Image (cartoon, grey):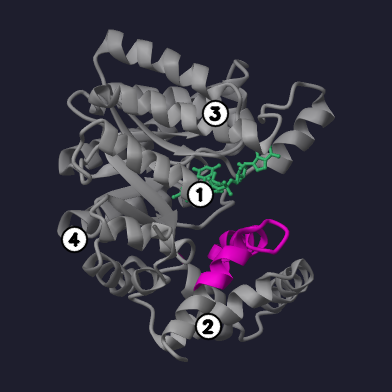
Amino acid sequence: MENLFNNTEVAFAIKSNKELKRAKFLFEMIASPTMVKIGTKLTNLALNLRLPVKGIIRKTVFDHFCGGETEEECLTVVNKMYAKGVSSVLDYSVEGKKDEQEFDKAVQVTLKTIEYAKQNPGIPIVVFKPTGFGRFELYEKIGEGKPLTEAEQKEWERVVERYDLVCRTSYENDIIILIDAEHSWMQDAADDLIEEMMSRYNKDKAIVFGTLQMYRWDRLDYLKKLHQRAKEKGFHIGMKVVRGAYMEVEAARAKEKGYKNPICESKEATDINYNNAIAYMMEHIEEMGIFAGTHNEESSLRLMNLVKEKGLAVNDRRVWFGQLYGMSDNISFNLANQGYNVAKYLPFGPVRDVMPYLIRRAEENTSVAGQTGRELSLINKEIKRRGL
Ligand SMILES: Cc1cc2nc3c(=O)[nH]c(=O)nc-3n(C[C@H](O)[C@H](O)[C@H](O)COP(=O)(O)OP(=O)(O)OC[C@H]3O[C@@H](n4cnc5c(N)ncnc54)[C@H](O)[C@@H]3O)c2cc1C
């Protein structure tokens, strides 16, 4: 049998010929690490000099990886994807902001995405980043167990209020809320707060989802202990399960500070850890909700099989598959075509502010990082099939 994920007619059904050719151009460009380096430097320079480059960024990399600059603009993509059974997770992808005003703005934007979700069945899930709602250094200090000053205590109370407001609003509207995971040295404080939110809002089912980064060797143990506490207190666990995006920085910091690298010793070890977490959660699916955030075909196949083995309906609302917009459409659209729940992160925000996100996507798609080969060959296959 041909690999399910190689059906490019299904994978690219919503892409016009023009969009397909743009994708080919884009992935060919970013296949070269040198091009990515030069492109990144020139783009940043042009933006800093306020040169009129927004148009060209929008027409190329931005429109491929993002839904638009605002929630409204995203709706065209949301509706197109949903017509093929693929849902959207509106993701306000503005990063690196550090002041209270920006944190409050991120809360307002997240609340607005919940409002959109309420009105649009194509948006069943929303998301935010811990450092979108509070200062990195504050999470870090709390995680280290250091005493806070009075001002910091007040600052943290505001972070807790922000989490509570969006989680409560999600709960009241029955919209799943995912909370991303970031660097390990700020994550403990975020995890404790997310656990508190789960205990408040996941009494009947998983609405609040934290994130397990399975490239961390300590996460399976963490999951099992969290499960014990959830059973004692009577709440469901919601988890986005990913491998993890900050491998190099984690290793470099561990080396510099002289502690054990929190990352698994090899890719294979990460893969095993990932599989084990998914298997554990599926074993206890009565008390859990899973969002498998991965572009890995084998991981996706495994979870499909577990759903079947468990006798669950393919569209059981406790199991979701997730990819990023602009990547791995072959997985998303073919899974949706088989009836599984699939949601793609659909980033939005002003072009300038979304640049760090776009640069990360370009970097992880270079030939060195490995994804491009697959994306390009699928795009070429579809171009050939359409006779373009
Ligand atoms: C919908 C979605 C949401 C996401 N949310 C988050 C998030 O909140 N936080 C976050 O950190 N990431 C997040 N990611 C990114 C994710 O963690 C991965 O970086 C990315 O998806 C690549 O992993 P993979 O499973 O798709 O594929 P694969 O290509 O199979 O795996 C690549 C990953 O394996 C791990 N790896 C590679 N080499 C080694 C090695 N030598 N030793 C140990 N491990 C290795 C790394 O984590 C690397 O990213 C998300 C991804 C998706 C699709």
| Residue positioned 51% across, 49% down in the render | 296
The amino acid sitting under disc 2 is Arg
- Viewer-closest of 347 and 306: 306
Return the residue at label 1: 296
Return the residue at label 4: 120
| Gap in angstroms between the C-alphas marked 4 and 1 | 29 Å
Q: Label 2: few (<14), some or many (≥20) within 10 Å?
A: some
Sequence-wise, the earlier of marks 3 and 1 is 3
| Gap in angstroms between the C-alphas marked 2 and 1 | 24 Å
Residue 195 falls in which quadrant of the image? top left
| Gap in angstroms between the C-alphas marked 3 and 1 | 14 Å
| Residue positioned 42% across, 87% down in the render | 17
| Residue positioned 39% across, 67% down in the render | 7
Foreground: disc 2 or disc 1? 1
Residue range highlighted in magenta: 349-378
Q: Secondary structure at mark 4?
A: loop
In the rendered image, the residue lying farthest to the front is 1
Sequence-wise, the earlier of marks 4 and 1 is 4
